[in-house]
Image: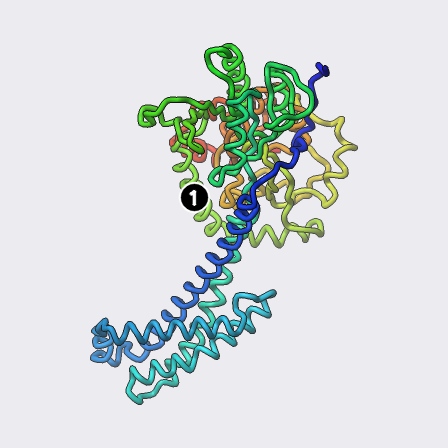
Amino acid sequence: MNTSHPTFPIGARAAIPPRGRSSLTDIMPKMHRIARRIFNSSALAWSDLALLSLALALANLAEHMPGHVDNFQRYFELRVSVRNLLLLAVSLLIWRFCLWAVGLYRSTSTMDLMRRVAGGVALSTPLAAAALMARHYGGDIVRPLIIFMVLSFVFLMSSRGVASLSAVLFHAHARPRRVAVVVGSGNLAQQLAEDLRESTVYDYEIYGFVDTVEQDGSDEIGPWLGNIEALSELLMHTPVDDVFVGLPVKSHYDTIQRVTEIVEIAGVQTQFPTKIVVTTVAKGIQEKEGRMILTMTHQDSRRHIKRMFDVVIASVLLILLLPLFLVVAILIPLTNWGPVFFKQQRYGLNKRRFYMFKFRSMVVDAEKKQAAIEHLNENAGPVFKIKSDPRITWIGKIIRKTSIDELPQLVNVLRGEMSLVGPRPLPLRDVTRFQELRHMRRFSVLPGMTGLWQVSGRSNLNFDGWVDLDLRYIDHWTLLMDVEILAKTLPAVLRGSGAA
């Protein structure tokens, strides 16, 4: 029997053997994808019809603007009747067919989209003309018809722009499956793993299992990852969202206590199947696949408030700072020709990788040149930092000193990859050098644009000081704390205290 513990390269995934599934299970993902496409297409179509109706209403209103006071008042006295509702329904059906006929929902490029939108407006115009003629009883409809055509084109194109921007900000990356590790290999653990794997509500990937009894290979749960003590190394190097404890409490109390300690230090959620049925006495108890599950987590409902706060503030800041963005975007390539933005993979919530955005402050090939200056590292610990980095351009020194280079991370905040306040996301290289399990608890929350250590000495603190402040923030978080940190960040930035 093999008694050695497996090693876990950071970010690795154990090879999970394929499992036999019923035909219904095979069909379900396809049904979900088809339903999503139908919903998205229908939502866009209804939006288009609403915009065309609005364009027609505004075009009609143009004929009743001041100067035609009596008609303007009569415009708002239009009665809702069965006849009018029937005409509206028929008009919407015809418009829907016109937009479908020109292939508006199959455009492949901006020019193709403009051509199809123009075609859709052209086909929709005769119906609008008929409606205007019926409304004006033979009056002049040329001006309102032109207004309808212009507004329709602008509205339909704008809706596509909003949809594209939303996709970039909020749906640019697929939501990853939650990764679970099961503790135990008995009947309870096997049934729990199977319930999670076959769930149509919770999208879990069973990474494998750990147990008090050492085993070879795999069983019904998945790959054997090692004994209980191997759990620490696993959580150090592998993205894991939940650890499910599938052990009987009475006979494995000490083991469960040890598992809880390990998982809590790493900042990962622990889930316990329980027979408790009164869910109102404990907010951490939920029903999953017919089982009552007790969740031990650092997260709570206040995180939703934090997310709303992040979205509102980040949206306002992006709008207000747009002129500054444009100026910086012009200066960067003038200083050192190349891209305006720099993106780099970082570890986020539960060690999920994401691309963090910055204004580029270094020469284009800065990462390739880092190996040559490793010996200049002035920071104790895994993080690389030197005050006078020769790779930084002159405009880079300014935007770093003022932290302007960090502002593009507002986009990361809107995408849900970062928060305004939280532990700073570190490069992949630095995280691989972590040596203590408690460091992993930094990944139990979203990384932030600023944090407690930025306003408590900024980057002048050593690595252990950073971690201590990050963990203090995680353990004592309140929305008021976020507001206070943001308020203190601006003076720290203006002073340039500790900025590299």
Q: Quadrant of the N terminus?
A: top right
Q: Nearer the viewer, residue 115 or 86?
A: 86
| Residue at left offset 59%, top offset 42% | 405
Quadrant of the image occupied by residue 219: top right
Three-letter amino acid code of the residue under disc 1 = Ile
Q: Nearer the viewer, residue 380 or 431?
A: 431
Q: Secondary structure at mark 1?
A: helix
Quadrant of the image occupied by residue 394: top right
- Viewed as shown, does residue 16 lie left or right of 404? right
Q: Is residue 92 above or below residue 273?
A: below
| Residue at left offset 64%, top offset 23% | 225
Residue 179 can be seen, yes or no: yes
| Residue at left offset 36%, top offset 83% | 130
Q: Quadrant of the C terminus?
A: top right
- Residue 143 position, x and y percent, is 38, 83
- Viewed as shown, does residue 131 lie left or right of 328? left
Q: Is residue 375 above or below residue 203?
A: above
